[in-house]
Image (cartoon, rainbow, N blue to C red):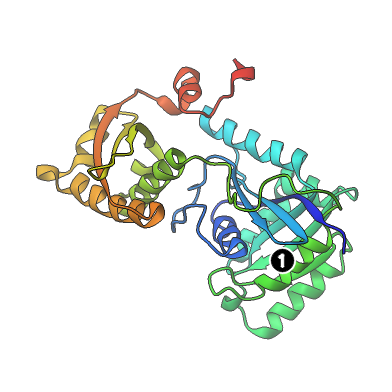
């Protein structure tokens, strides 16, 4: 068998299970996961390497209609992933009829489905929420459109049909050499993943608009021989009124955030760390191109 290698973009609306699916396909956690929509802000790259193939997964932000500059940049990540990919995994959440309808009506997804030059696999996720006869009806409906290489029901949470989906992706990859060394599982740095872990805990612990108004920056990351590694992180919020919410009464909220984040970071890094959290206000950072550029959402060529 000749070696196969290529990019597989995971495309869908917010909260349909894109990150959970990529983690299941990789067999390890790369993308953060929360119950809230719009958790993924940047394209996350996950690499699965075996003897005869390499799949480079692109976990993209959920497709939405942008209302501020950050969301515009998130959608640009989706568009660049569509340009880069060899195979497309379009994912529907079958636990919600409204979600399926929105997926079918979404302009980006519709345009991708109608493009016959692209290799597309339709994933019907959260299939464990449907009775078997409904599952069969959905599969027959989408197979009948002749728009997809295959239609695969999965439950990313339960790891159901993940192996079948993986084999289907490999089948549709182009032949060619590997892009990355086998031991590399992502192009993200430790700093990036640590900031994502803290952001995940913010989504878990805080309500309403707070998680969406936060960005996490790693100010310092020092490996130390005779002591725990030192990590200093800044939690950036949009308004002065949000800072005391992050900190909490007598500092209890930020203490809980620090404890949960530290444990998850230590599990990820495989060593003990000393984590320090600080809160800073950057007024309306989500709509400010200067802040977005410094946070990595606007690349150099965009100015």
Residue at label 1? Answer: 166
The image quadrant of residue 121 is bottom right
Q: Nearer the viewer, residue 160 or 92?
A: 160
Quarter that holds the N terminus: bottom right
Which residue lies at the image location 78% right of the left edge and 52% below the top edge?
5
Looking at the image, can residue 68 be seen?
Answer: no
Label 1 neighbour load within 10 Å: few <14, some 14-19, many 20+: some
Horizontal side, residue 46 vs residue 133: left or right: left
Give the image location of residue 150, x and y in percent. 81, 67
How many labels, in total?
1
Horizontal side, residue 244 vs residue 59: left or right: left
Which residue lies at the image location 24% right of the left edge and 32% below the top edge?
241
Q: Nearer the viewer, residue 95 or 200?
A: 200
User: Farthest top residue?
Assistant: 303
Looking at the image, can residue 295 be seen?
Answer: yes
Q: Nearer the viewer, residue 74 or 265?
A: 265
Is residue 277 depicted above or below 160 in this figure?
Answer: above
Give the image location of residue 296, x and y in percent. 51, 28
Give the image location of residue 229, x and y in percent. 29, 42
Which residue lies at the image location 80% right of the left edge and 48% below the top edge?
177
Horizontal side, residue 39 vs residue 166: left or right: left
User: Farthest left residue?
Assistant: 250
User: Farthest front residue?
Assistant: 225
Horizontal side, residue 288 vs residue 255: left or right: right
Quarter that holds the C terminus: top right
The image quadrant of residue 301 is top right
Which residue lies at the image location 51% right of the left edge and 52% below the top edge?
31
Badge 1 marks a residue whose secondary structure is helix
């Amino acid at each position: 068998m000749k070696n196969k290698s290529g990019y597989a973009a995971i495309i869908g609306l917010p909260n349909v299970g894109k990150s959970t699916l990529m983690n299941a396909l990789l067999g390890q956690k790369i993308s953060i996961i929360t119950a809230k929509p719009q958790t993924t802000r940047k394209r996350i790259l996950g690499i699965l390497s075996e003897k005869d193939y390499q799949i480079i997964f692109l976990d993209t932000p959920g497709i939405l209609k942008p209302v501020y500059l950050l969301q515009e940049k998130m959608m640009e990540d989706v568009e660049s992933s569509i340009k880069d990919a060899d195979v497309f995994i379009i994912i529907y959440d079958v636990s919600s009829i409204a979600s399926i309808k929105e997926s079918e009506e979404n302009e980006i997804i519709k345009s991708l489905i109608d493009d016959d030059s692209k290799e597309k696999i339709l994933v019907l996720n959260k299939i464990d929420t449907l009775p078997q006869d409904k599952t069969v009806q959905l599969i027959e409906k989408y197979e009948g459109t002749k728009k997809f290489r295959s239609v695969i029901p999965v439950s990313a949470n339960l790891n159901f049909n993940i192996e079948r989906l993986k084999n289907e992706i490999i089948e549709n990859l182009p032949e060619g050499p590997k892009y990355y060394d086998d031991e590399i599982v992502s192009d993200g740095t430790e700093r990036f993943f640590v900031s994502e872990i803290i952001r995940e805990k913010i989504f878990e612990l805080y309500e309403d608009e707070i998680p969406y108004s936060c960005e996490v920056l790693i100010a310092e990351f020092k490996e130390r021989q005779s002591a725990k590694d030192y990590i200093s992180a800044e939690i950036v919020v949009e308004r002065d009124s949000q800072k005391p919410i992050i900190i909490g009464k007598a500092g209890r909220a930020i203490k809980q955030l620090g404890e949960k984040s530290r444990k998850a970071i230590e599990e990820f890094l495989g060593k003990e760390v000393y984590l320090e959290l600080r809160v800073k206000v950057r007024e309306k950072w989500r709509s400010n191109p200067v802040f977005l550029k410094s946070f990595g959402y606007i690349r150099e060529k965009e100015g």
